[in-house]
């Protein structure tokens, strides 16, 4: 497993959470359990946070298949035409807020760099600026794309937002050095700007050559191009351009930063639809941590994404909020007041009043394949809560797969995640449309994770045509 270098700069920017402890961690074999020792150490450092299973309150999850009028959804059509829209609306109004709908009227793409012999000849590298308005001064985003030259046709591609600038994912000197705002604490980005020092710094979280070798492309965007990650009253990034109220006020359901980052992923999809080197029917959107929350939200809204991956996304991502294990709604809203919409703050300490929980976010991705991953030491993100969200979304997947016209009945065991208890460490569940693993180690995006995601994509996207 690659040594995680993304974690080093990230540690500096996290206000809390990923505290590590020495000593034995969760169990191998059947049914992962959090290490008691780790939980105790974390609880000592953060007594206000719950790290113990026995202290999880009793809760009842809203039923994804129960309509607001009390009727039960019994067929795929009712889900697609009615219930899906209801749930989406609840997330828009109460959790992430509303982004502008669809692509901006005046949006242009400029391929400002193209090399068909990149990385020693194995890859095609493209760099594209997406201008959201006619103003070339911004806001805009740069997409860095690597495609395997071994591909014989349009390439299925992994799309991921990055934390440190496109230039930080690989040492390739031709990657444009980001000019966007960078967190000052980032090594090599003094004065809130990136420097050459950060080139290739986060490579271990983006194993470009390995991805290309497996036949996938990689497309990545610095998340700060869309919205710099700090609370500034939404004065910069895409909010500054697209929030238009005469008196400058923002409604309680206006989009937060996660909404803006997810919106950017859909704009990248708009670009892919114009690029014949990329297979826009096989785009996998994935993300780590806050950007894992973002990937889920992007995939939930935009059905053009063929598969969605959440890596250690935790609270507001794949983890069930009602469990109040690790990071809570109140805690996340206080630490990151700009991530969600204002209305989400009404649920601080009142998780049971939320009309949704995060299993319903996963259900919105159905019937497309979704993969959720946790890490053993990442108790802040509540691994069990992430697994349980998958499990409680499985009913929607079963309904859709069984009932879709022309689709064969699926073999038994297909919905493993629904019947299984949480698997042991490093025992991925991959056969069904909902994939899950918990790997050993800490909060990070590692090569082990990438390998599982590509295995899962091989399994579930190949029916869309294999061309390499
Ligand atoms: C933490 C936050 C998490 C997670 C993480 C990250 O500080 O509490 O929800 O998103 O940051 O994005 O690295």
Image (tube, helix red, strand yellow):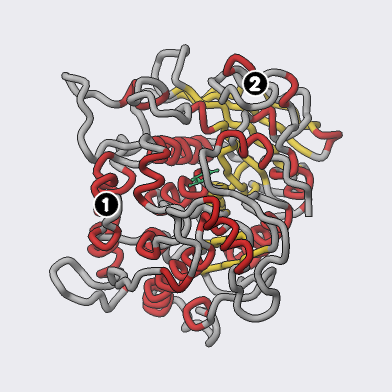
Judged from this view, the residue extending furthest toward the left is 69
Find residue 465 and report its horizontal and vertical position in percent. Answer: 61, 60
Marks 2 and 1, the one that precedes in the sequence: 2
Residue 177 placement, left or right of 80 = right
C-alpha span from label 2 to label 1: 36 Å
Considering only vertical position in the picture, is 200 above or below 176? below
Q: Does the rendering let one see residue 309?
A: no
Q: Which residue is mark 1?
A: 347
Find residue 454 and report its horizontal and vertical position in percent. Answer: 67, 58
Name the image quarter holding residue 277.
top right
Find residue 92 and report its horizontal and vertical position in percent. Answer: 28, 47
Tell me the residue at 31%/48% (across/down).
95
Q: Residue 60 has which mark?
A: none
Count residues near mark 1 (Cα–Cα under 10 Å), then give few for <14, some for 14-19, many for 20+: some
Please tell me which residue lies in front, 194 or 213: 194
Q: Could you tell me if the residues under marks 2 and 1 are in contact, i.e. CB atoms within 8 Å?
A: no
Ligand 1 neighbours mark 2 (CB distance < 8 Å): no
Q: Which residue is mark 2?
A: 189
Quadrant of the frame with the C terminus: bottom right
Q: Does the rendering let one see residue 278?
A: yes
Judged from this view, the residue extending furthest toward the right is 120
Tell me the residue at 75%/54% (across/down).
214
Name the image quarter holding residue 333.
top left
Residue 357 placement, left or right of 251 = right
């Amino acid at each position: 497993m690659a040594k995680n270098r993304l974690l080093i700069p990230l540690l500096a920017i996290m206000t809390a959470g990923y505290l590590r402890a020495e000593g034995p961690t969760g169990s191998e074999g059947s049914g992962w359990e959090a290490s008691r020792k780790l939980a105790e150490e974390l609880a000592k450092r953060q007594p206000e946070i719950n790290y113990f299973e026995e202290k999880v309150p009793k809760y009842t999850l809203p039923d994804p298949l129960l309509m607001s009028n009390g009727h039960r959804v019994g067929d795929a059509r009712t889900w697609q035409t009615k219930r899906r829209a209801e749930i989406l609306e609840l997330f828009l109004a109460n959790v992430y807020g509303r982004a502008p709908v669809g692509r901006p009227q005046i949006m242009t793409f400029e391929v400002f760099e193209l090399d068909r012999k990149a990385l020693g000849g194995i890859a095609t590298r493209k760099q594209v600026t997406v201008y959201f308005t006619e103003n070339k001064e911004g806001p805009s985003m740069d997409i860095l794309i690597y495609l395997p030259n071994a591909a014989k046709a349009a390439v299925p591609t992994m799309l991921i937002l990055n934390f440190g600038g496109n230039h930080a994912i690989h040492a390739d000197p031709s990657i444009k050095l980001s000019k966007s705002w960078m967190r000052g604490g980032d090594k090599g980005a003094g004065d809130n700007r990136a420097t050459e020092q950060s080139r290739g710094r986060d490579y271990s979280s983006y194993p470009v050559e390995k991805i290309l070798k497996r036949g996938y492309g990689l497309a990545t965007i610095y998340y700060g191009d869309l919205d710099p990650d700090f609370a500034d009253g939404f004065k910069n990034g895409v909010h500054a351009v697209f929030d238009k109220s005469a008196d400058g006020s923002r409604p309680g359901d206006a989009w937060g930063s996660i909404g803006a980052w997810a919106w950017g992923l859909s704009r990248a999809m708009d670009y892919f639809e114009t690029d014949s080197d990329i297979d826009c029917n096989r785009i996998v959107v994935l993300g780590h941590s806050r950007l894992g929350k973002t990937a889920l939200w992007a995939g939930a809204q935009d059905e053009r994404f063929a598969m969605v991956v959440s890596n250690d996304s935790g609270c507001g991502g794949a983890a069930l909020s009602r469990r109040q294990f690790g990071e809570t709604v109140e805690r996340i809203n206080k630490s990151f007041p700009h991530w969600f919409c204002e209305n989400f703050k009404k649920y601080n300490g009142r998780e049971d009043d939320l009309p949704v929980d995060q299993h319903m976010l996963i259900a919105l991705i159905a019937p497309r394949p979704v993969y959720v991953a946790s890490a053993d030491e990442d108790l802040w993100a509540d691994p069990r809560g992430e697994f349980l969200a998958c499990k409680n979304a499985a009913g929607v997947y079963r309904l859709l797969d069984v009932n879709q016209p022309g689709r064969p009945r699926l073999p038994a065991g297909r919905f493993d995640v629904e019947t299984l208890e949480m698997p042991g460490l490093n025992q991925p569940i991959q056969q069904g449309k909902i994939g899950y693993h918990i790997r050993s180690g800490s909060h990070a995006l590692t090569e082990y994770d990438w390998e599982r995601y590509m295995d899962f994509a091989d399994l579930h996207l190949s029916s869309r045509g294999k061309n390499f």
